Image (spheres, rainbow, N blue to C red):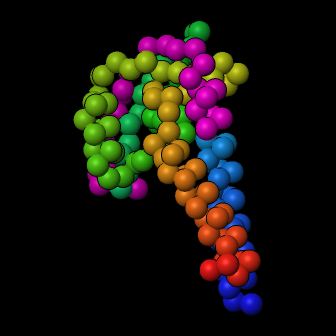
């Protein structure tokens, strides 16, 4: 009974992770087709100096006559702590000009890097959890 519960939990968790990865992949695919505009970084705090201990990069961009601000670097999952966050902080210093991809249906939604930091890991993790969970639930392990 316990192995069935554990297997079911792993199966459900893996399915949820895989569903999130598919949603993330679809968003990244759409972001790669969004129009681009030039923006500028107006604020950058390294990890540990911001309120939540994460890298904080704020950029500003213009669409038509309106000016927008956003903190989203990647279109999909993004790493806001650790080594990659420090690299981003060095790359996006204040006054750095950036190419911003924005959603034409909702210009508040934008990104500087139309990609995902964790997409491959999320897909692989979801598949592994589903396979292991199925094997445990069916009593194969």
Q: Nearer the viewer, residue 17 or 46?
A: 17
Q: Which residue of the protein is positioned furthest toward the left in this rendering?
A: 90
Q: Is residue 121 above or below residue 72?
A: below
Task: Look at the image and say whether residue 33 sits in the magenta stretch.
Answer: yes
Visible in this render: residue 109?
Answer: no
Q: Residue at x 32, y 44 (%)?
A: 84
Q: In which quarter of the image is the N terminus?
A: bottom right
User: Which residue: 32% across, 53% down?
Assistant: 82
Is residue 128 shown in magenta?
Answer: no
* Residue 50 position in % (x across, y down): 34, 50
Q: In which quadrant of the rendered image does the C terminus lie?
A: bottom right
Image quadrant assignment for residue 51: bottom left
How many numbered markers are drawn?
0
Q: Which residue is depicted at the point 55% across and 28% down?
A: 110
Relative to 74, 45 lies left or right? left
Please say if 11 is above or below 71. below
- The magenta region covers 25-52
Choose between 36 and 39: the one closer to the eye. Answer: 36
* Percent position of residue 61, x then y: 48, 19
Residue 25, position as x, y percentages in the image: 61, 38
Which residue appears at 72% of the width and 77% of the height? 137
Whether residue 29 is visible, yes or no, is yes
State the residue lying farthest toward the bottom: 1
Q: Quadrant of residue 7?
A: bottom right
Residue 95 sits above or below residue 56 on the image: above
């Amino acid at each position: 009974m316990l192995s069935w519960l554990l297997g079911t939990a792993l199966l459900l968790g893996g399915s949820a992770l895989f569903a999130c990865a598919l949603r993330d992949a679809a968003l990244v695919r759409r972001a790669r087709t969004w129009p681009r505009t030039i923006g500028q970084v107006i604020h950058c705090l390294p990890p540990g100096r911001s309120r939540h201990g994460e890298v904080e990069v704020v950029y500003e961009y213009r669409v038509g006559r309106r000016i927008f601000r956003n903190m989203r670097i990647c279109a999909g999952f993004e790493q806001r702590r650790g080594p990659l966050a420090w690299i981003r902080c060095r790359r996006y210093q204040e006054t750095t000009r950036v190419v911003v991809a924005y959603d034409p249906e909702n210009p508040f939604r934008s990104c500087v890097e139309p990609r995902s930091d964790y997409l491959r890991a999320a897909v692989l993790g979801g598949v592994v959890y589903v396979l292991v969970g199925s094997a445990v639930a069916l009593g194969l392990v």
